[in-house]
Amino acid sequence: MNDALIDAARRAREHARAHFSHFRVGAALETADGTIVTGCNIENATYGLTICAERVAMFKALSEGHQRFTRIAIVADTDDPTSPCGPCRQILWEFGGDLEVILANLSEEKGRYMLRDLLPLPFDARVLGHKR
Ligand code: THU
């Protein structure tokens, strides 16, 4: 399916700093008002400070004042869908809620999921007794 959000994630992937894994990922997060905020994975020489494309997109968006989100597209050059890692699922859930997660590669869409299905029984602020 042709989708501007997927195209934005593909373009963001071009900026990935993946000199160590050579695995480049792009993400595009859609806000409630239709703004698209992108991210790419950024690795560094210590490896452990790597940050995934999804979290770059979410942290950029939060830092720019966005608070409500609807969808995120994630793109990698893989035949099987590249889905978000555990830490990214947690961050997307806590700050984005039940996003639609669209997985795609360079040429086609590979699937759509709701985040609640990718992160069942989540730990979040409600467990701590806070309202979201
Ligand atoms: N990576 C992402 O950016 N997002 C994902 O959904 C999966 C993994 C990055 C982290 C690291 O830079 C590289 O891909 C290999 O794991």
Image: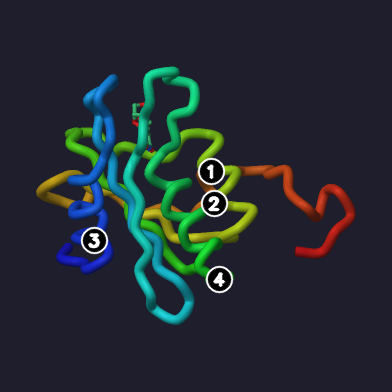
Amino acid type of the residue tagged 4 in the rendering = Gly
Amino acid type of the residue tagged 1 in the rendering = Arg
Q: Which residue is mark 4?
A: 65
Within 10 Å of disc 4 (Cα), the crowding (few <14, some 14-19, many 20+) is: few
State which quadrant residue 57 falls in. bottom left
Question: Ligand 1 is located in which of the four quadrants?
Answer: top left
Q: How many marks?
A: 4
Amino acid type of the residue tagged 3 in the rendering = Ala
Q: Which residue is mark 1?
A: 89
* Distance from Cα at disc 3 to Cα at disc 4: 20 Å
Report helix, strand or loop for mark 3: helix
- Pointers 4 and 2 in contact (CB under 8 A)? no
Q: Is mark 3 within 8 Å of ligand 1?
A: no
Q: Quadrant of the N terminus?
A: bottom left
Q: Nearer the viewer, residue 91 or 40?
A: 40
Amino acid type of the residue tagged 2 in the rendering = Leu
* Distance from Cα at disc 2 to Cα at disc 3: 18 Å
Report helix, strand or loop for mark 2: helix
- Pointers 2 and 1 in contact (CB under 8 A)? yes
